[in-house]
Amino acid sequence: MQTTRVLGRSGIEVSALGFGCWAIGGEWRSTDGQPLGWGRVDDEESVRAVRRALDLGVTFFDTADTYGAGHSERVLGRALGRRRADVVVATKWGNVFDERTRTLTGGDDSVAYVRRALTASLRRLGTDYVDLYQFHLADADPERAAPLRDVCEELVREGLIRAYAWSTDDPARAAVFAKGPHCAAVQYSANVLQDAPGMFRLCEETGLAGVVRSPLAMGLLTGGQVPGRVPGAGDIRSRPPAWLKGFVDGAGADPEWFARVEALREVLTAGGRTLAQGALAWLWARGPGTVPIPGFRSVAQAEENAGALEKGPLTAGQMAEVERILGR
């Protein structure tokens, strides 16, 4: 398999696998106490995991200003250190939060906020530019998106960002940003359990890269989440919001979703892959411009995810078998 990709129309080369840095932000919450992180983390282990990923050929790291209310950006910036120039860093704006209390307080889709948010992200990341800057309000008014796209074009001209994207699961919204010359990607949710045909099609038609979040279905496709095993109190999966499918409030993995994972296990683990590596292989076979960004919290997870690069995409026969098993 080609282990690198060009990020859409930008000319920016990235590894075919990115690493998502939501989990390493640690605990944060909404104003009503809903957990929004993945529980407690060990920052030193996070730093070791990022550096191990770099050694294994991963050059694309995706974070957001709001992950851990700024903490993920700080940890990533520290981990990259002098190797910043060797990697492609993506972050996001649009959410408003309190760093001191680690609380999400709202959203801001105004033109004025873009530059303020970027300045703060650059400071936390310890860098003077962001490679891919992404609008993080998935359901924002598309009428307000064109001016935000224009601001991003200004930021490209000023050298503060190299390219931009919208993190949204709506093809119509993504298409608004796609009209900008320096729009390089769209970030959307997809995995073998939750296909996103409209988003894959949009990427093919517009030449955008598909940065795929939740490629492992929030851990369901790692085998580590099972019915009855409840994630810790600070973990979003312990009290899943409506958009988070596959988990039951206070009960761990949804038994129906878990049964689907088990039904897929044999085909996904063929060829010596782990379950997670098979899930990533499905995404590479699903779209040639796809860059999945699995999360991680340990060196072991970084090594397992990066190991998928050696094994490449599923075959056409394996893809057909997946569809047969799922009845799609």
Image: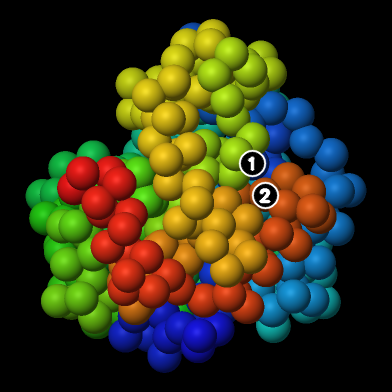
Residue 61 vs 73, above or below: the answer is below
The answer to whether 76 appears left or right of 82 in the picture is: left
Residue 23's mark?
1
Measure the alpha-carbon separation of dots 1 and 2.
6 Å
Residue 296's mark?
2
Label 2: state its secondary structure: loop
Could you tell me residue 111's position as x and y percent?
30, 53
The structure residue drawn at horizontal position 33% and vertical position 21%, both measured from the top left corner, is: 242
Could you tell me residue 140's position as x and y percent?
23, 42
The crowding category of the residue bearing disc 2, from other C-alpha atoms within 10 Å (few below 14, some 14 to 19, many at least 20), is: many
Could you tell me residue 141's position as x and y percent?
16, 42
Q: Which quadrant of the figure has residue 149?
A: bottom left
| Colour setup of the view | rainbow
The structure residue drawn at horizontal position 81% and vertical position 67%, both measured from the top left corner, is: 52
The structure residue drawn at horizontal position 70% and vertical position 59%, both measured from the top left corner, is: 304
Camera-side residue: 75 or 193? 193
Q: Earlier in the sequence, mark 1 or mark 2?
A: 1
Camera-side residue: 96 or 321? 321
Could you tell me residue 222's position as x and y percent?
59, 44
The answer to whether 66 appears left or right of 86 in the picture is: left
Residue 276's mark?
none
Residue 216 vs 97, above or below: the answer is below
Residues at circles 1 and 2 in contact by the CB criterion of under 8 Å: yes
- Which amino acid type is marked by label 2? Phe
- Which amino acid type is marked by label 1? Ala
Residue 62 vs 80, above or below: the answer is above
